[in-house]
Amino acid sequence: MLKFRNDDLYIENVKLSDIAKEYGTSTYVYSKQQIISNFENYKKAMVLRDGLICFACKTNSSGAILKILAGLGAGADTTSGGEIYRCLKAGFNPSNIVYAGVGKTAEEIEYALKSKIFMFNVESFEELDIIDKIAGKMKRKANIAFRINPYVNPDTHSYIATGKKGTKFGIPYEDAVKAYLTAKKKKNISVVGIHYHIGSQILEVEPFVVAAKKIKKIVDEVEMNGMWISYIDCGGGLGIKYEKGEKVPSPKCLISEIFSVFDKDKKFIFEPGRSIIGNAGHLLAKVLYRKMSGGKSFLITDVGMNDLIRPTLYDAYHEIVPVKKTRVKKVRSDVVGPICESGDFMGKDRMLPIVDQGEYLLVTCAGAYGAAMSSEYNSRPPLAEVLVDGKQTKLIRKRASYKDLVFNEIL
């Protein structure tokens, strides 16, 4: 939903320069229509089977965005009690909420049971014991799936590869059947599914299919032992296009390939996050200063690594574009922020036109793991967030003040 009209960059039908003038910078800006379109692509791909599209709200937990997705009929993939709380506040049906996470606390488990969520994705034998114990005290049955580590290592950054051997996630593949036989003996546990997730920002279908085939073997063996698995929870992980030339499979291509692995009577859960919100959100920045140092050109902006940590943490690439077209020559520059760290950058060695002080840049495809991973490092207040719908803009998160920084402190 980004497009130049004449010399101005628009998001839907609003000039980004107008958003900067009205709401200030740095500011996260989201396209409502892009969110809807991305979700509908998954919904259409699911028509042949029963199941849920559960938005992975760790990617972006903004209440307004969650509310949009809840209104579209999405489920929620949550990883903490706080995410469950946010999703309930946003209007998600608790029976469409799945609770994953390798370190669920007893308090979070109790809260999830009280909230009547659909299912826990269980990651260890000890977690199973705790859920069974708490459910027993509450006189409830807890629906569970085991997260099984299929030992598949996709081509992605090592920090976001979660299905390879030796990670903290899931039940080891060789212990999968044992886990189900253990759960069968628990009085307060109802086994309804199996879960796997191999990582994030994956740009090929093949690793997903390899993982699905390995999980199918577990399903078959578990069912031969007299247990029925209704739901195949395939996790998320489909990537988006960050750089020119990258090719990304469609949700339809991914889902149809996975459907072909499993029997037709199975129900499915998919947990997309980045591929729903990633290219729907962008970070609007202002150039504060231009500087030459050591033979290098720097554009110093008001966006810091505390606002978008992905380039620093993952060496992630985000395209950076001026919001006004210019015909001046391009210069190789580092786009950096004001944080007191040499690792504070949005992009290095970018060919950009000479942008004057006070003009605006857009860091694109920052909707996933942008605002959600931001912090107050260097005592920088959290940013404003704006939702665009056609010609309309709406402030969905106020820019924090200095007073907000110390709001919860006891001085």
Image (cartoon, rainbow, N blue to C red):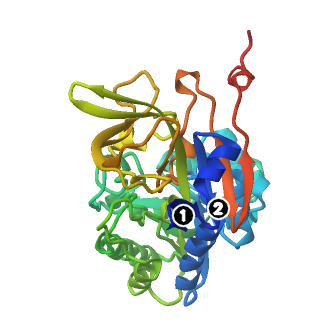
Which residue in the structure is indicated by mark 1?
A: 145
Front residue of this view, candidates 345 and 362: 362
Label 1 CA crowd tier, 10 Å (few <14, some 14–19, many 20+): many
Q: Residue furthest top?
A: 411
Quarter assignment of residue 26? top right
Picture residue at 65% right of the left edge, 65% below the top? 32
Residue 104's place in the image compared with 342, above or below, is below
Front residue of this view, candidates 318 and 231: 318
Front residue of this view, candidates 58 and 195: 58
Picture residue at 52% right of the left edge, 46% below the top? 370
**Which quarter of the rendering shows the C terminus?**
top right
Of helix, strand and loop, which one carries label 2? strand
Of helix, strand and loop, which one carries label 1? strand
Residue 117 visible in this rendered orientation of the protein: no
Relative image position of residue 227 (x, y in whole percent)? 52, 75
Which residue in the structure is indicated by mark 2?
A: 14
Residue 170's place in the image compared with 23, above or below, is below
Quarter assignment of residue 340? top left
Label 2 CA crowd tier, 10 Å (few <14, some 14–19, many 20+): some
Between the C-alphas of marks 2 and 1, the distance is 44 Å
Amino acid identity at mark 2: Val
Residue 139's place in the image compared with 26, above or below, is below
Picture residue at 53% right of the left edge, 22% below the top? 378
Quarter assignment of residue 258? bottom left
Relative image position of residue 18 (x, y in whole percent)? 65, 52
Relative image position of residue 362 (x, y in whole percent)? 49, 50
